[in-house]
Amino acid sequence: MNTATNALEPSKTALPQRPLRRRLAASCFAVFTIVATAALPLPVLARSTPESFADLAADVTPAVVNISASTTVEARNRTLPQLPPGTPFEDLFEEFFNRRGQGGGGGDSAPSRPRSSNSLGSGFVIDPSGIVVTNNHVIGDANDISVIFPDGTRLKAEIVGKDSKVDLAVLKVKSDKPLKAVKFGDSDSIRPGDWVMAIGNPFGLGGSVTAGIVSARGRNIESGPYDNYIQTDASINKGNSGGPLFNMNGEVIGINTAILSPTGGSVGIGFAVPASTAVPVIDQLRQFGETRRGWLGVRIQNVDDATAEALSLGTARGALIAGIDDKGPAKPAGLEVGDVIVRFDGKEVKDSRDLPRIVASTPVGKAVDVAIVRKGQEMTKQVTLGRLEDTEKQASLQQPSTEPPTTTRQALGLNMSGMTDELRRRFSLKDDLKGVVITRVDPNSNASDKRIQAGEVIVEVNQEPVTSPSDVTKKIDDLKAQGRKSALLLVSNAQGEVRFVALSIE
């Protein structure tokens, strides 16, 4: 150690004097180097990590609550397993059940006892008068809900409204004094990499603060029709559901809802409902006690590259209309099966997932402009939105009624036949279903890859009705002559539900 210290000592002594000319030259070179370096563009540096989240946490934590929900259900009668008489396990099982008050010897006549199912979650106050937001799955069908505040205060809560599709619930508590509340922020302005902070009740440990960044936006986790989650690596665990995800201004930009975990604990992949999705739903629940979503009355599917080429869209985009509800607002507005919706009320529809979310957030009764592409031409239709009913709307399509021929042909890896009574019985086809029946699919064909099956019916080819196999082959020949690479088929199943399928014709 002493040797090392002594070895460094010479660097502390004065440098030997050099001739003046050499020293000036060295000084000029140093100045030139500094100036030249200063003239170069500086690299863009990431913002520094926050020194502490303590002040932010202290400010918003009083508004974050624990939710305790209890559901009382009737317990099922328990009976002893059917064991051979005299088995040594008979006494053991009888003692086990009797010790738990389940009356092993009572059989089906034994009285049932109600049992309570409890769940714990998180929530947050959005109005000092006592309005609390949480997840719908936290309260479920609970008949006893309590909101527990950080100071230990426990208040009974009543349900204002809940929505299973976005997984939100609004509760109301009565307090003798105004409550600490937090406000929503602009979730659309956040970017992957922005800092966020989560507060909640993981595993019953109330008031737990975790921090991380936004990992991604617009995540679809297949949990509902309006999936548009914020993904974060801030630790979210069981019990965090319903709690707030804050930006660095102390604003709620998400409601923690789900995690992806093979272990049951946080692995750094959590999901939050963005404020932009949650706020309209919360406002409707507060105002009406239920949601009132816009309804267009169409059934849609995504547009892939092959379908885009067949429809002359250029690039895969928009939502392809595969069905029109006869009682919906789309039909009188002039929308048709085969139209591709590319903009709705001024908002771009990038793919089919965008449309339900945009339509649902649009007020009922509003007249909106809908930009569509029909046979390669863009046009605009105006639609006055209806209200989405709780029951799912089914498309009802009517095709021209013509007597189909009975000839059989083969094309695109499909064996096709005209509609006959025998085929209708064989494949259990609806009586009013019209088109060309697929009797066999080549397992090595593109049609098989697209999951077309025998018993399905070709209703249209490139948005034109077909009633005979020769109609199909003629339209395919026409497409080949035009240099097209794919044919767009409207295919129906036996129940009349249709979908578009693009098949290669090369």
Image: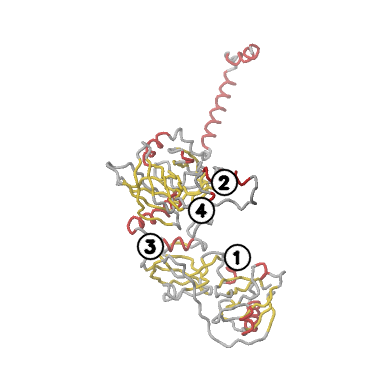
Q: CA distance from mark 1 to mark 4?
A: 57 Å
Q: Residue at x 46, y 65 (%)?
A: 343
- Type of amino acid at the residue the image marks with label 4: Asn
How many neighbours does mark 2 have within 10 angstroms: few (below 14), some (14-19), or many (20 or more)?
Answer: some
How many neighbours does mark 4 have within 10 angstroms: few (below 14), some (14-19), or many (20 or more)?
Answer: some
- Type of amino acid at the residue the image marks with label 1: Asp
In the rendered image, which residue does mark 1 sit on?
305
Q: CA distance from mark 3 to mark 2?
A: 54 Å
Q: Secondary structure at mark 1?
A: helix
Whichever of callouts 3 and 1 sits on the residue coming sooner in the sequence is: 3
Q: Residue at x 55, y 75 (%)?
A: 496
Q: Position of residue 113 (x, y in %)?
A: 45, 50
Whichever of callouts 1 and 2 sits on the residue coming sooner in the sequence is: 2
Say which quadrant the N terminus sits in.
Answer: top right
Q: Position of residue 459 (x, y in %)?
A: 58, 78
Tags 1 and 4 touching, CB below 8 Å: no
In the rendered image, which residue does mark 2 sit on?
94
Tags 3 and 4 touching, CB below 8 Å: no
Q: Position of residue 283 (x, y in %)?
A: 35, 55
49 over 258 or under it: above or below: above
